[in-house]
Image (cartoon, rainbow, N blue to C red):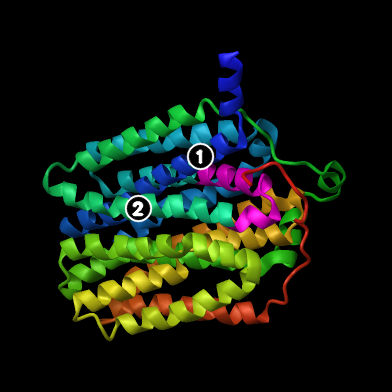
């Protein structure tokens, strides 16, 4: 009897959701750690900011490489195998980073981490969106975003451990990833919903076209968030060192941006459930443009810069989860895996070109280059949102999920 109760608890939607949230927090931690940690290590050995940005882009090249091929295995094998393989790739790569500190070796490992991270996040996002009702989708994805942001905020703090032992941050991250794998193994595997008639009528490229036609603007928040996240964590440490900002302040400013996003992640998700995702996306990108633009005028005051980082994070830190929820509102359920693939591709493109363009801007321009770049991208997304007329809501069905 007790065994049956335990199995019911392990297979319950609440337990599944808790495990997925914990797992996302750990992957956020490893991702948040790698970007500034490796950027600082490469900068200290004399690697140029442009090459540093290219190395940082390896993570997102991995995301792009696996994205076109991840949907079919998910439909065949289900969520759990995809997540477990992704966690293994991340854990092994984290263990290998300290053993050979060579530019191209790190670049390859970052690609592998990107592949693993995308497998984990793609399966998790589809699993959550497919099992959440319309009334709770924004809230559930906000909790998902909150968990990732919490891990991402703690990650940059690992730069302080470099002075103790350069191996230590990687060991901590790999152990955390391995422990997460232990939680996932007890989950019951599930598969995304299928609409057989629609699947036969639409091939892969036809599904991509259908998603883009119905929900192109819902793909832009993922692109924007990837761009600014990768630029901040990949380029800002380099920009800060060249501008005379201490490394200790970098380890405070970057987490403060993520913490700002954590503060408003759940409220914005709940508000978007009521007032509409498009309206909230337009609001936060417009105000985010102003906040990032203001940083250039307050850079001499670390306290003022800290406040602006928190405000900026509070405004735009929920863009990714808002975009996923908006996409799920618009698309029919059988297109959700395809839509999430395209969000991953959009995020990967933004994350890949962000550090590269950011590195070029730092080399070419002096004060404020990183702030002007990010504020410009936010402005373009706001303008695009004004041109989007919205789409038909296909997600009114009640599904099994976390109420």
The x, y position of residue 393, in whole percent, is: 76, 63
Residue 305 falls inside the magenta stretch: no
Q: Nearer the viewer, residue 209 or 240?
A: 240
Residue carrying label 2 = 32
Badge number at residue 88 = none
Dot 2 lies on which element? helix
Q: Nearer the viewer, residue 209 or 211?
A: 211
- Which span of residues is magenta-colored? 118-138
Q: Calculate the distance from the C-alpha at mark 2 to the C-alpha at mark 1.
A: 21 Å
What residue is drawn where x is 61% and y is 25%? 8
Query: Which mark is nearer the camera, 2 or 1?
Result: 1
The x, y position of residue 117, in whole percent, is: 47, 45
Q: Magenta-highlighted stretch: main secondary structure?
A: helix
The x, y position of residue 332, in whole percent, is: 77, 54
- Mark 2 and mark 1 residues within 8 Å of each other at the beta carbon: no
Instruction: Answer with left or right where residue 214 lies relative to residue 239.
Output: right
What residue is drawn where x is 72% and y is 72%? 390
With respect to residue 309, does 320 lie above or below? Answer: above
Badge 2 density bin: few <14, some 14–19, many ≥20, Cα 10 Å: many
């Amino acid at each position: 009897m007790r065994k049956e109760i335990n199995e019911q608890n392990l297979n319950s939607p609440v337990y599944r959701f808790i495990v997925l949230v914990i797992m996302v927090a750990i992957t956020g931690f490893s991702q948040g750690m790698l970007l500034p940690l490796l950027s600082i290590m490469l900068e200290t050995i004399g690697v140029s900011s442009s090459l540093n940005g290219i190395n940082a882009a390896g993570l997102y090249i991995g995301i792009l490489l696996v994205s076109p091929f991840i949907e079919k295995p998910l439909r065949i094998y289900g969520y759990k195998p995809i997540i477990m393989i992704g966690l293994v790739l991340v854990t092994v790569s984290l263990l290998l980073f300290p053993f050979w500190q060579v530019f191209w070796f790190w670049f390859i490992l970052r690609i592998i981490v990107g592949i693993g991270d995308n497998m984990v996040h793609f399966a998790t996002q589809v699993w959550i969106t497919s099992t959440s009702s319309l009334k709770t989708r924004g809230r559930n994805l906000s909790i998902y975003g909150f968990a990732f942001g919490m891990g991402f905020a703690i990650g940059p703090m690992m730069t302080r451990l470099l002075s103790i032992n350069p191996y230590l941050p990687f060991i901590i991250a790999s152990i955390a990833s391995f422990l997460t794998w232990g939680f996932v193994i007890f989950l019951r595997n599930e598969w995304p919903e299928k609409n057989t008639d629609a699947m036969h009528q639409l091939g892969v490229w036809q599904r991509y076209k259908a998603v883009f036609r119905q929900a192109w603007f819902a793909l832009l928040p993922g692109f924007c968030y990837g761009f600014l996240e990768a630029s901040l964590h990949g380029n800002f440490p380099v920009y800060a060192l060249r501008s005379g900002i201490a490394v200790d302040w970098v380890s405070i400013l970057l987490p403060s941006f993520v913490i700002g996003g954590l503060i408003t992640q759940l409220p914005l998700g709940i508000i978007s459930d009521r007032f509409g995702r498009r309206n909230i996306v337009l609001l936060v990108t417009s105000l985010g443009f102003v906040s990032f633009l203001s940083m250039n005028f307050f850079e001499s005051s670390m306290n003022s810069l800290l406040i602006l980082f928190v405000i900026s994070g509070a405004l735009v830190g929920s863009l990714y989860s808002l975009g996923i929820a908006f996409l799920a509102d618009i698309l029919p359920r059988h297109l959700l895996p395809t839509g999430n693939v395209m969000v991953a591709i959009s995020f990967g493109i933004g994350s890949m070109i962000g550090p590269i363009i950011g590195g070029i801007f730092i080399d070419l321009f002096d004060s404020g280059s990183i702030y002007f770049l990010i504020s410009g991208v936010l402005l373009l997304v706001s303008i695009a949102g004004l041109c989007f007329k919205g789409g038909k809501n296909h997600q009114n069905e009640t599904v099994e999920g976390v109420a």
